[in-house]
Amino acid sequence: MDALTTLPVLLPLLGAAASIGVGRWRNAQRAIGIVTLTAVTVLSAVALVRVDRGGTTAVAIGDWGAPVGITLVADRLALLVLVASMIMLLAVLVFAIGQPGAETHHVGFHPVYLVLAAGVALALLTGDLFNLFVAFEMMLMSSYVLITLGGRRDQIRSGMTYVIISLIASSLFLVTLGLVYAATGTVNMADLSGAVADLPDGVRSGIAVLLVVVFGIKAAIFPLFFWLPDSYPTAPTPVTAIFAGLLTKVGVYALIRTQTVVFPESTRPGTLLLVVAGLTMVVGVLGAITQYDIKRLLSFHIVSQIGYMVMGLGLFTVAGVAGAVLYIVHQIVVKTTLFMVGGLVELRAGTGEIDRIGGLARLEPVLAVLWMLPALSLAGIPPFSGFVGKLALVDAGFDAGEHAVVAVSLVVSVMTLFSMMKIWSNVFWEVPEVQPSPQAEQSTPFGRGLMVGSTAAVVVVGLAIALWAGPLHDLTLRAAEELLDGSTYRTAVLGP
């Protein structure tokens, strides 16, 4: 079990080193990337099954025990999000191999992409705040390289905005780490759960709010989301897809992990999180409705959908946290899918502007189907995975008596459907019909097959979430019970 916990971090780093060594041979780089991510996906799935049956596992790196040493912790929450993340990383890599220009002309794409995968795995598995900071920095360095691939002026400008905001968040995180260590003498999350309880109420609340701000910037919650809609749309489609599916969700994961494991119930800022959740939903969907570029519209929906996850956390009930975890898994899959389909539309039409595209349903019926299914899921239409996730959150909200935020979530769902239908009617049915773009003419039948095939595979994963929603929700309920209780996590890390 120790290997199952450490290999998801170690294998991508070794793969990145090997990919640098074979940089002259692109096919070798591709093979290394696909084999590495496939192996990590399988190992993560096996670890999830074992942890669900046998309980949380903690590994002390170098046999330096907690709270002094580096500890990796595999529990239901971490592994469930890790499995979904690795499936998306693998699918998007296949998509990138098929797309002309995405990775063909950049020797550093594959090594950097694998370092990003390692950073995601470390962020999900680490048991202390300092190594969570290290994981975020790994993702930041990788994402800056990926977001500026191509070297266009708009990419560099947007990439600089992304980096500056991320550095501000990282600096604030580092300051917060210093305050936490000064107050408690530890940064191990299991150890902090006891040390924080002994602090004065004001200090505990201040640290909790600081961590909400730090991870709120990463997650793009209101009012800290302004960097996202300008940063993501300029990047190559595979990069945008994986950023949309993973990076903000890792920020939400960090919020859930710290607010449940580290802080006692009396300190958790539930009301603040519920207000932020409602505002995030509304502002994001209003921004989406006003957009006429596919990627920018979907980027605002990233913000809006984050609000649902924060809503589940803000309830601080088993049902609420379980709904948030289920919604994270759903969003990782659906949001990645929509950006992949958006990239296919842009490749076919030569533009992402909605009012300049039309008639794709007749020219590309497969794309129409691949768009419609995740779009309905995003809006929460039954029987898709988005409906399952929203139903879990709405039920949890009613049970907790938080009717206002539930009402906001339902109204936002209707507005989300409206914005998705705007793309559906304009892009796929309106005239004039599009002409083949220069990029589409450069793509080979094999490359297009890889792009469409990987996108279809991700759509199938989204449908599978809806099909097995019952067992998956039961798993998230067990994860939520474990999080809110905390004793299993502490025992696994610190011992009896």
Image (spheres, rainbow, N blue to C red):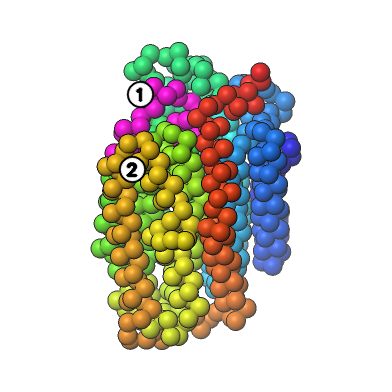
- The question of residue 302 being in magenta is answered with no
Which residue does the image show at 59% across and 81% down from the upper left? 444
Q: 361 or 291, which lies in front?
A: 361
Type of the residue with mark 2 = Ala
The circle drawn on residue 206 is: 1
Which residue does the image show at 51% across and 21% down from the upper left? 192
Q: Position of residue 263 (x, y in %)?
A: 45, 24
Secondary structure predominantly adopted by residues drawn in magenta:
helix
Q: Is residue 230 above or below residue 132?
A: below
- If the image is split into quadrants, where does the N terminus sit? top right
Q: Position of residue 5 (x, y in %)?
A: 68, 39
Q: Is residue 78 left or right of residue 21?
A: left
Q: 134 or 345, which lies in front?
A: 345
| Quarter of the view holding residue 342 | bottom left
Which residue does the image show at 51% across and 83% down from the upper left? 441
Residue located beneath label 2 in the image: 277
Q: Earlier in the sequence, mark 2 or mark 1?
A: 1
Report whether residue 191 is seen.
Answer: yes
Q: Which residues are magenta?
A: 256-275
Type of the residue with mark 1 = Gly
